[in-house]
Image (cartoon, helix red, strand yellow):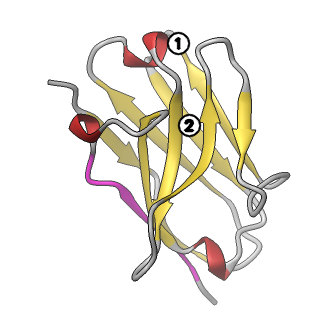
Amino acid sequence: QVQVVESGGGLVQPGGSLRLSCVASGNIFMLNAMGWYRQAPGMQRELVASLTKDGVTNYADSVKGRFIISRDKDKNMVYLQMNSLKSDDTAVYYCNGFPWVVAWRGSGTQVTVSS
């Protein structure tokens, strides 16, 4: 069973930055496209950024130019660098396959943007 663990969330002021990290068992990052998702209270989960096996990235319009998804193949980790954070970015962030794989769900990491 694939285990996914997200980390790096926290409380940050508007305009600040955070870097989220994701580690998973097995070589899923090498074999699958990956994505970062988020879910705010009362809202549906949304895809924030995706990264294909070939390194092609794609971003939601709301984060384009502010967030960067990347991968470290040697460490089997995926990252989400988040800059110029806004209050609307407040949510629980999840790392998963792209598209979402139900069996891979981790516990997520909370990001709160507030002054």
Kindly indicate the quadrant of the structure image that contains residue 71. top right
Horizontally, is 13 left or right of 97 in the view? right
> Which residue, as the protein is rendered here, is positioned at the far left?
1
In the image, which disc is placed on residue 73? 1
Residue 58: which quarter of the image? top right
Which region is colored magenta?
106-113
Q: Quadrant of the C terminus?
A: bottom right
Label drawn at residue 79: 2
- Relative to 4, is 6 above or below? below
* Mark linked to residue 52: none
26 sits left or right of 93 in the view: left
Few, some or many residues within 10 Å of mark 1 (<14, 14–19, 20+): few
Q: Nearer the viewer, residue 108 or 35?
A: 35
Residue at coordinates 61% horizontally, 71% vertically from top-left? 89
Amino acid type of the residue that numbered disc 2 sits on in the rendered structure: Tyr
Label 2 with label 1: CB-CB less than 8 Å: no
Q: Amino acid at mark 1?
A: Lys
Q: Is residue 110 left or right of residue 72?
A: left
Measured Cα–Cα span from mark 2 to mark 1: 11 Å
For marks 2 and 1 on the same chain, the one whose residue lies earlier in the sequence? 1
Q: Nearer the viewer, residue 19 or 98?
A: 98
Image location of residue 100, percent across then percent down: 40, 39
Q: What element does badge 1 sit on?
A: loop
Q: Is residue 8 magenta?
A: no
Q: Where residue 40 sits: x, y (%)?
A: 46, 74
The answer to whether residue 6 is above or below residue 46 is: above
Give 9 or 92, whichever is nearer the viewer: 92
Measured as percent of width and height from the top left, residue 15 is found at: 77, 73
